[in-house]
Structure formats: structure tokens, C-alpha cells
Image (cartoon, rainbow, N blue to C red):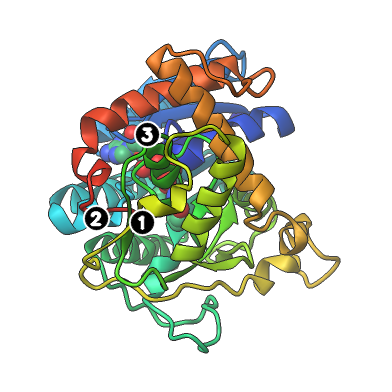
Amino acid sequence: MNDTILVTGAAGFIGSNFVLQWLAAESALLVNLDALTYAGNAGSLIDVSEHPRYHFVHGDINDRRLVSSLLAEQQPSAIIHFAAESHVDRSIRGPEEFIRTNIQGTFALLEEAKAYWKSLAEEDQKARFRFLHVSTDEVYGSLAEHDPAFCETTPYAPNSPYAASKAASDHLVRAYHHTYGLPTLTTNCSNNYGPFQFPEKLIPLMIHNALRGEPLPVYGDGQNVRDWLYVGDHCSAIRCVLHRGRCGETYNIGGRSERRNLDVVRTICAVLDELRPDSLHKPHAELITFVTDRPGHDRRYAIDFSKISITPTGSPPSPTAAIATGSPLTTPKLEALASHADCAQGHHSRRRHWHAPLSGHALHLQAASAHLRQADDLLPAQRADAGGYS
Ligand SMILES: NC(=O)c1ccc[n+]([C@@H]2O[C@H](COP(=O)([O-])OP(=O)(O)OC[C@H]3O[C@@H](n4cnc5c(N)ncnc54)[C@H](O)[C@@H]3O)[C@@H](O)[C@H]2O)c1
């Protein structure tokens, strides 16, 4: 077994942030297996494409022959499984792809991981191997305003085809541990925000539309609450669970940062008003448009992540305790994202922008503007007033 990890779906939003953090903080080689669907953006990792410890493989997790040969060739000590269809609205319009990737794809990966793990010659290699499955808090369903936050023992009650497909994959992972002894770990996290997110999700969609003076579609009354988790904190927590988690366990990861959707959108508008005082679209809040609610829209998510704030042995506190006080969704965070997108848009349209790019981010801006170009092709409905975000 090599000092290598296999990461699926690492050209996506969270995966690409994970790669950058991993290469900066860890010593093992990282192999990224990604099918580059509409949500994957190889440009997000352009900075590290030549990195000696990074290797990209273009392929589908359902391709068992490919996965099998990759495992035999690379001999990884862990698989981190991010690859998924991840957008709730798309799952409502067309659930098949969610069944294929999230359920069948996870099954294919588990089967190949089991065969590889069983083939490991040494007992200590078998004991070291980990299969870490990245999942969502949406498997727990919806909370009322005063309900306690989701914890790891909250019963599953998924409400969308996306959540149901992730719940099914979580159950498969659990079963492969209990039935075959595969050393699995599962993490269930809340809504992430941060760089490289595809602009079909709430925060990047609102920034993207506001910068263009297009309607900001808010579902229903805008009072749905999400517990926002900064993607960098999420990646740190995943690394911590990988190194210290107990096999067969699940760990919730949250941001302790509950916000109503409407408040998030208003904050983005206020940030943009400040960032672009000469904008023709100011005040940006006037672009807010309430649209028909998503069917089965979960009202509130909140995560109790006290379990990862202590090590599996009890004490001392693990590094993930830092996220309890770490990076709540603040105006400066949104400001950084908005100015990043602002620069990317300027780059994309080749217009000179009044706002100076964040220093040292030229390549990231290229990646972000590639995503914006993709979004222009893929999001005509969301860019009008049809709604659509997660
Ligand atoms: N973004 C969030 O807020 C959030 C919250 C909770 C959980 N999650 C989970 O975290 C994981 C990553 O989410 P994300 O937001 O980065 O997703 P994303 O949609 O941005 O990226 C998914 C990546 O998976 C790849 N992919 C899709 N199907 C594939 C296949 N069959 N084979 C190989 N690669 C494939 C895509 O090309 C893309 O690069 C997902 O499992 C998601 O369910 C995300």
C-alpha cells in the first residue's frame, strides 16, 4: 500500500478545495478520479495540475474496470468519496442521474474498494485502509424552528430525490462496514460556501445575478434556514475524521451559523452596494424577486457537531473543535466571494473592472470565469426569475 489517497469528484466545489488544502497540509499523493460533469471544473485545480503529488484521472465511478485498475495501480491507503450529483432542483427535474451516480456509483466504488481491501497482503495494511464517504445533513429531513439540531442518531427522513439518493448511499456504506468489515467513515455536513462553487447554488447564484442586474429569485417567503459551513473548515474536519475517526462511525460537520435565505441574500446585496458604489443596479436588494417555493422544500437544517469536537477516545479536543469558533458566515466572507466573482466576471467579459483583482488569484479568476461561462450556458432559467438553488 502506498502513501496515496484516491479522491472521487475532486474537480467539484468541495473536492477542489480539499485538493488544495491536502497538498498544502499533508504529504501523501492525491489521485483525483472525476467524470467532469457540468459541475466539475478542471480549471479550479489549474494551479496544481503539474504538482508532483497530484494526479488527475478522467473517469466515471461507475466504470468498475477503471476503478479496479486504478486501485491496483495506485495502492491507496484511503478513498475519499465526494463524487455525486449534488443539486436538489436538478434531482426534482430528473432523478435518474442521481440514482446512477449517488447510489449505483457508490455501490460500484464500495464493491471495488472491498475487493482491493481484501487483496491487501498485510493485516496492518487492512487495518490502516479507510473508505471515507462524504454526505449531507439533508438525509435527516427538515427541522421546525425550535427543534434541536440534527445529531448522528437523528432518524433519516430524506425529502428530495437528492437527499434520498444520498441516504441510500449512506446505508450502503454502513452495510459494507457491518457486513464485510470494510473500514468506513461517513460525514454528514451542512450547506457549504466558499470559492469554486458552481453558480446554481444560493450564494454564487445571487452574486452572479446581482452583478448582472438580473432578478434574485428567492424561494417562497425566504425564511428557510441553513447552517452555513465554510468549505475550508469542512475540508479540515474531513481530514481530521480521516486521521482520527473510528471505523463504522458517522460524524456530523456544521458551521454553527444558521441564517435565513432572505437574510443571506440581503447581506450579499449590501456587500455589493458597498463594493460597487457606481453600479447601475444599486440598491441590489431591489432585484430580489420571490418565486414559487420548491416542492418539498425543507424549512430548516441545523447541525450538532459536538461528536467531532472530541477525539474518539474522549480528550483532548480534536482540531475540529476550532470550527466551533472558526468561520461563521460573515459579511467579510461574503465580501471576499463577491469581489472574487466580480473580478471573474470582468475577466470573463473582457471588460476592465474598477475593482482590483485579489492579489495572486489570476489563475483562480480564470477558473471562476470558466465556471461563469458554463453557468451562462446552463442556467437560463435561474438567470431569469424561475428560482433554483440549494
Ligand atoms: N455543496 C454542499 O453544500 C454540500 C453539502 C453537503 C454535502 N455535500 C456532498 O459533498 C460532496 C461534494 O459536493 P460538491 O458541492 O463539491 O458537488 P459538486 O456538484 O460541485 O461536484 C461533484 C463532482 O463530482 C463529479 N462527478 C459527478 N458524477 C460523477 C461520476 N459518476 N463519476 C466521477 N465523478 C463524478 C463531478 O464532475 C464534480 O466534479 C457530494 O457528495 C455532496 O452530496 C455537499
Residue 386 in view, yes or no: yes
- In the rendered structure, are the residues bearing label 3 and label 2 in contact, judged by CB atoms less than 8 Å apart? no
Provide residue 333's location: percent of width, then percent of height. 64, 46
Q: Nearer the viewer, residue 197 or 120?
A: 197
Say the numbered circle drawn on residue 212.
Answer: 3
Ligand 1 sits in quadrant:
top left
Amino acid, disc 3:
Arg
Q: Which residue is at 47% across, 72% downward?
A: 301
x, y (%) of residue 164? Answer: 27, 66
N-term-proximal mark, 1 vs 3:
3
Task: Left or right? Give the position of 131 relative to 287.
Answer: right
Which quarter of the rendered picture does the N terminus lie within? top right
Callout 2 secondary element: helix
Specify whether 3 is left or right of 143.
Answer: right
**Disc 1 target residue:** 390
User: Disc 2 designates what residue?
Assistant: 89
Q: Is residue 26 above or below residue 315?
A: above
- 181, 50: nearer the viewer: 50
